[in-house]
């Protein structure tokens, strides 16, 4: 699919960090395409490379440790890595906005929430202070917070309301792409449901593309159209929501679903994935998942599995699938 047809297109992205002369293989060969009005869920354990992928879109990798080894990222057809610093600043917040993982540390404690929402409007739209504050009030109301709280400070809001403020800041300039990094982390179940409802409503009201980063399959089921399962820096399975939830193929994806509680059978035992995600400084040879995989074959520890397309929308990277084998799980 051509980059011009997608709000976001990531092609063969590889990212490394160099720490004390050691190389951290954070992201390897990642491909993602998100059309306007669609939501892509990037799922994986902590340390899988999800946030690094998101920061790469904004060209915000920590320097000098982080470096783009290869790949391209297009936002509305523009190559992000070829933009000047001035063009990057213009893109961030206006075309692409990000909801960071921790709302507690993302807000400035000495500025009112209204000032923080209005800031992006003044920078990217050039509106007056008065007009920016008026629009900030409307943004607060849009995310379910009374407009008369626009002059209050972050410490006066609960965790869930701070997350809503962060979403209001991200949406203030009507971005074409919204990146949400663990948008419901540290929120109680009721507030999680409210935030997910808000995300669904925003999706229905606009043509905005969304990248949702999470480890929770329940969130993916609520808001996503397509899903990428990430392990040790690689997307090991990718497809539509139906492909992943009804026709999953990778043993790691199977392990994620098997580790969920079965609400229809309270006595069923959980099946956790054995072992831990590998050290990105010392990834095992071949398929990085093979030391934890009950389906592993000799070639899994020797050769890196290639992409195998199972349909027009669904692919898997696993030695269980080759030209003559199908539906192994």
Image (cartoon, rainbow, N blue to C red):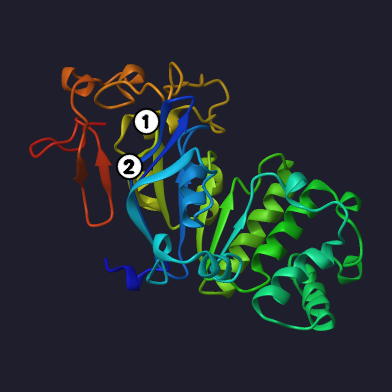
Q: Quadrant of residue 165?
A: bottom right
Q: Position of residue 103 (x, y in %)?
A: 73, 48
Which numbered disc, 1 or 2, marks the residue that appears first in the sequence? 2
Label 1–label 2 contact, CB within 8 A: yes
How many C-alpha atoms fall within 10 Å of the one at disc 1: few (<14), some, or many (≥20)? many
- The label on residue 237 is 2
Q: CA distance from mark 1 to mark 2?
A: 9 Å
Say which mark, if any, is on residue 304. none
Tell me which residue sits at (79%, 68%) in the image: 140
* The C terminus sits in image quarter: top left
Of residue 171 and residue 227, the one placed in the foreground of this image is 171
Work out which quarter of the rendered image holds the N terminus and state it. Answer: bottom left
Give residue 273's quadrant in the image: top left
Q: Where is residue 256 shown, x and y percent of the image? A: 44, 32
- Residue 29 locus on image (x, y percent): 31, 44
Residue that numbered label 1 is attached to:
252
Which element is circle 2 on? strand
Q: Residue at x 58, y 53 (%)?
A: 180
Against 130, residue 280 (above or below) is: above
Q: Indicate left or right for 121 with 161 as reference.
A: left
* Residue at screen point 9% across, 40% down: 323
Q: Is residue 10 visible?
A: no
Tag count in the figure? Answer: 2
Residue located at (49% from left, 37% from top): 65
Is 77 located above or below residue 39 in the figure?
below
């Amino acid at each position: 699919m051509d980059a011009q047809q997608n709000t976001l297109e990531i092609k063969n992205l590889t990212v490394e960090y160099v720490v004390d002369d050691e190389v951290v293989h954070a992201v390897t060969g990642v491909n993602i395409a998100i059309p306007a009005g669609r939501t892509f869920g990037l799922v994986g354990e902590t340390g899988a490379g999800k946030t690094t992928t998101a920061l790469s879109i904004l060209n915000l990798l920590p320097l000098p440790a982080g470096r783009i080894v290869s790949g391209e990222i297009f936002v509305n057809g523009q190559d992000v890595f070829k933009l000047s610093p001035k063009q990057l600043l213009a893109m961030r917040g206006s075309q692409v906005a990000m909801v960071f993982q921790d709302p507690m540390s993302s807000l400035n404690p000495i500025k009112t929430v209204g000032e923080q929402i209005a800031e992006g409007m003044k920078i990217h739209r050039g509106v007056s202070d008065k007009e920016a504050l008026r629009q900030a009030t409307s943004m607060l109301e849009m995310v379910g917070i009374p407009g008369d709280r626009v002059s209050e400070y972050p410490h006066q809001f609960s965790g869930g309301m701070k997350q809503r403020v962060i979403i209001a800041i991200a949406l203030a300039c009507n971005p074409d792409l919204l990146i949400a990094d663990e948008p419901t982390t540290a929120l109680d179940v009721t507030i999680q449901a409210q935030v997910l409802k808000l995300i669904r409503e925003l999706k229905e009201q606009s043509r905005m593309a969304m990248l949702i980063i999470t480890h929770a399959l329940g969130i993916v089921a609520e808001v996503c159209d397509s899903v990428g399962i990430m392990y040790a820096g690689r997307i090991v399975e990718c497809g539509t929501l139906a492909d992943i939830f009804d026709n999953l193929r990778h043993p790691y994806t199977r392990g994620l679903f098997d580790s969920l509680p079965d609400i229809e059978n309270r006595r069923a035992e959980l099946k956790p994935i054995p072992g831990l995600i590998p050290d990105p400084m010392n990834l095992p040879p071949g398929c990085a998942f093979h030391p934890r995989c009950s389906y592993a074959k000799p070639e899994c520890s020797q050769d890196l599995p290639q992409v195998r397309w199972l349909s027009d929308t669904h692919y898997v990277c696993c030695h269980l699938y080759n030209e003559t084998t199908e539906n192994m799980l």
